[in-house]
Image (spheres, helix red, strand yellow):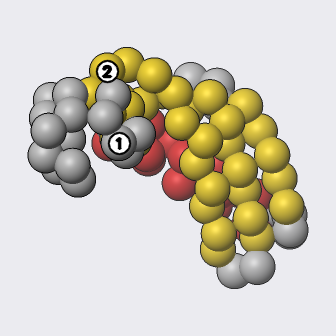
Amino acid sequence: MTCVICKSGETQPGTATVTLEREGATVVIKRVPARVCKTCGEEYVEESVTASLLKTAEEAVHAGVQVDVRTYAAA
């Protein structure tokens, strides 16, 4: 797909590091599957992966976590 940010680069499979913050909790998830623009580096995460990340962050908030760093694991 063509990058919507730089409008000239093409995306390719890769990984991203995603940081989510909510209610005082910060969750960092590394090696998240994404499409990455070869030109500008913009990262695109698919909807199903995003849903999984949000669920993980919600669980961390309910567990009282302040800072958590994880490696992505497909459900």
Query: Is residue 70 depicted above or below 73 in this figure?
Result: below
Residue with the mark numbered 1? 40
Residue type marked 1? Cys
> In the image, what residue occupies the spot 37% across and 32% down?
36
42 or 70: nearer the viewer = 42
Q: Which mark is residue 12?
A: 2
The secondary element bearing badge 1 is classed as loop
Q: Nearer the viewer, mark 2 or mark 1?
A: 1
Q: Quadrant of the N terminus?
A: top left
In which quadrant of the rendered view does residue 66 lie? bottom right
Q: Is there a contact, CB below 8 Å, between mark 2 and mark 1?
A: no
> In the image, what residue occupies the spot 72% across and 56% down?
27
Query: Is residue 68 depicted above or below 41 in this figure?
Result: below
The secondary element bearing badge 2 is classed as strand
> In the image, what residue occupies the spot 62% across and 28% down?
31
Instruction: Decide if residue 33 is on the left or right side of residue 23.
Output: left
Residue 46 picture location, percent across and down: 33, 37
How packed mark 1 is, by other alpha carbons closer than 10 Å (few <14, some 14-19, many 20 or more), is: some
